[in-house]
Amino acid sequence: MAISGKGIGEAPLVIAVVVDPWRDPKHFVEAGAVAAQNMALAAHSLGLATYWAGIYEAGGGRRSVEARVKRLLGVPREMHVIALLPIGVPAYQAQSERVGLEELVRHDRFES
């Protein structure tokens, strides 16, 4: 069974972000998302490339992508795969100018 997506099959490493909803039933999706984001930022800081491939589907059935990934990896039924992070060497280096903080920050207030 192949799980395909641009870059996933060719990546030298793919991290599956798996969570146990019993540890925090109200926030397990957010916990997995935060973990995935932190791993993506860490990879970027090391000069590696990655992207978020969302897998979790609330109420997803046996034919969902999450169910296929869980079967492929042997993930226990009660756990959820939130995302896959393919990690590798970037195909190119983006060239951009950093935007100054003064262009991003606004000093306003919400008015009622």
Image (spheres, grey):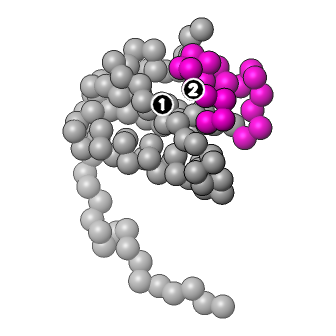
Residue 98: x %, y % from top left: 26, 55
Give the spatial CA distance, label 2 vs label 1: 10 Å
Residue 82: x %, y % from top left: 57, 38
Q: Quadrant of residue 60?
A: top right
Label 2: how many residues lie within 10 Å, few (<14), some (14-19) or many (20+)?
some
Q: Is residue 30 magenta?
A: no
Q: Among all residues in the image, which is located at the extreme left?
A: 46
Label 1: how many residues lie within 10 Å, few (<14), some (14-19) or many (20+)?
many
Q: Quadrant of residue 65?
A: top right
Q: How many numbered circles does the render carry?
A: 2
Q: Is 55 or 50 nearer to us in this picture? A: 55
Does 102 sit above or below residue 73?
below
Q: Is residue 14 left or right of residue 81?
A: left
Q: Is 88 or 57 nearer to us in this picture? A: 57
Residue that badge 1 annotates: 16
Residue pictured at 47% horizontal, 51% vertical: 34
First in sequence: mark 2 vs mark 1: 1
Q: Which residues are magenta?
A: 58-79
Residue 37: x %, y % from top left: 43, 47
Residue pictured at 57% horizontal, 16% vertical: 72
> In which quadrant will I find the C terminus?
bottom right
Residue that badge 2 annotates: 75
Q: Nearer the viewer, mark 2 or mark 1?
A: 2
